[in-house]
Amino acid sequence: MVPADEGGGLMRADLLTDAVDGLDEALAAVDAFDRALRGGLLRPQPAQAEGLAALAGAVAGTPLAERVAEAAAKAGAGAAGEDHLTALAAARTALLGAVHDALLARADEATGRSRADGTPAAAAGAHGANLRAAARAWLCDLARAGWHGIDHDLVSQADTVVAAMLPDPALRRLAALLDGFAAELAASCPGASPERVPVRRWADLWARALLLTQQGAPAAPAAGTATGRLLPLGVDLQEHPTAVQAQVHAVFEPADGTTSRLVRASVSAPKPDTIVGAGLWQLLRPRTALLAAAGDGRSMELDAMPVTAGGDLIWDDAHAKPGGTADPFATARVALSTAAAAATAPLDRHPAVIAEPVLLEGYTARQDDDGTLVFDLAGHLLAVDADRIPVAGPLTPEAVAASGACIGLLRWDAGGFRVQPLAVETTVRRKAVAVHAGAWAAGTADKAGARAEKAATDAVSVLRERAGRLLRA
């Protein structure tokens, strides 16, 4: 057994490398269905029918068994209707949900973390039946055409539905998903070549969207309120060509003295593709005081802040004020091991959403045989996901490789657990220092960061001037 680290460290690193029973079989069934979906279900070939049968076989013995078996037979014959395709999407989602649950249970066992029981409730979508039906029809047409059979005419049919959904807050979640999905498909039209098809991602988007079109599907997570102290651990910066999001992971200590909890708070902003690097913070910084607190190493005092049962704070600066100094590593060592994690909403149960805050200490960082940076924890190797380290901060793979302690997010990717560093403790000029991925969120005196910020300021000014001209015209 690997001994426990002090505080919030990994208690059983060996468990992260042990096989999970049934995992490979479940993922193989998902992959078989995804291959069938890639080729289209209008005139399925024998290999596609086998993939559909594999999905049905994987849920045999469950409440879905009868409906999925019928749907697989109909789809294999090229006669699947909307209900059949929905049943297949539900089976695929259930399998990945089971994989998520098994992996999360293993992560909780390795970290010794407790987790809330039950399933977070959500408000049910009770209107927009016609728009949901139109979206469902489009998604079923995509399944029949397959990713190799899409064209601009088919993909563009989503535009009208999305435009009608966006003004309705209850439908905006589905609208945003459809809009992004359609944009990805349009970029690969006509007929995506095999090497350009992200098979699992598009199947994920398709299945999730199809389930959200059902009447009674969750419209938004139900929210309560949180009053107490928020102690940031680190910032995960996620960038897209047209958008950027900063997600702050933190420990929340309720004012009533109940058990502390792990929570997240996100802030997003649209972005032009000319703004990259440290300039991204300029887009996000005015939107929330939380980023300033995370960048400066301070806590926040919350008063009736909306929070979902899944642990997501619906951030509003009106419900928060700056607190005292709060060192993330001190928080991790003292509070992370006892903070309870939230349950995951049903449609969010997917291996890709696993992102568990952990503190790692006592490791040796080195390069594996294939060149991957790994942490050696008493002989057990945990891969470091260096590709997720944002360039909009001082944290670098070199700093991680020279570190002795790390706050990170435990993820599952490419068939194994990995850690995404959010902050490390390392030695610079014989002095111990902490380096944070989100250190520039509140501003920076770093020369490279300052230059990037100035370039972003110039770019934003030019874009605003051009937008003003267009509006005046």
Image (cartoon, grey):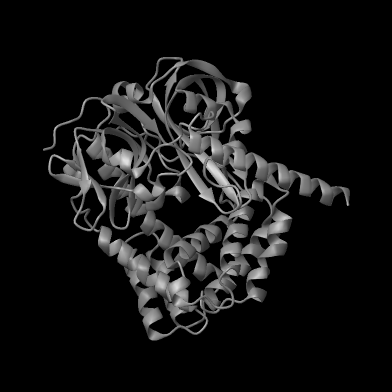
Q: Residue at x 40, y 57 (%)?
A: 94
Comparing 200 with 51, the one in front is 200
Taking the view exactly as shown, the residue that stands out farthest to the right is: 473
Left or right relative to 402: residue 66 = right
Comparing 428 with 76, the one in front is 428
Left or right relative to 21: residue 275 = right
Residue 55 versus residue 455 in the image, above or below: below
Q: Residue at x 25, y 35 (%)?
A: 111
> How far across and how far down the image is residue 404, in percent?
24, 33
Left or right relative to 127: residue 423 = left
Q: From this viewpoint, is residue 69 visible?
A: no
> How far across and how far down the image is residue 313, in percent?
52, 32
Q: Residue at x 61, y 42 (%)?
A: 456
Comparing 207 with 273, the one in front is 273
Comparing 307 with 91, the one in front is 307
User: Residue 25 lies in what quarter of the image?
Assistant: bottom left
User: Residue 468 lies in what quarter of the image?
Assistant: top right
> How far across and how far down the image is residue 317, in percent?
61, 25
Q: From this viewpoint, is residue 412 visible?
A: yes
> How far across and how far down the image is residue 325, in percent?
44, 16
Q: In which quadrant of the rendered image does the N terminus lie?
A: top left
Q: Residue at x 48, y 32 (%)?
A: 446
- Give the mark count: 0
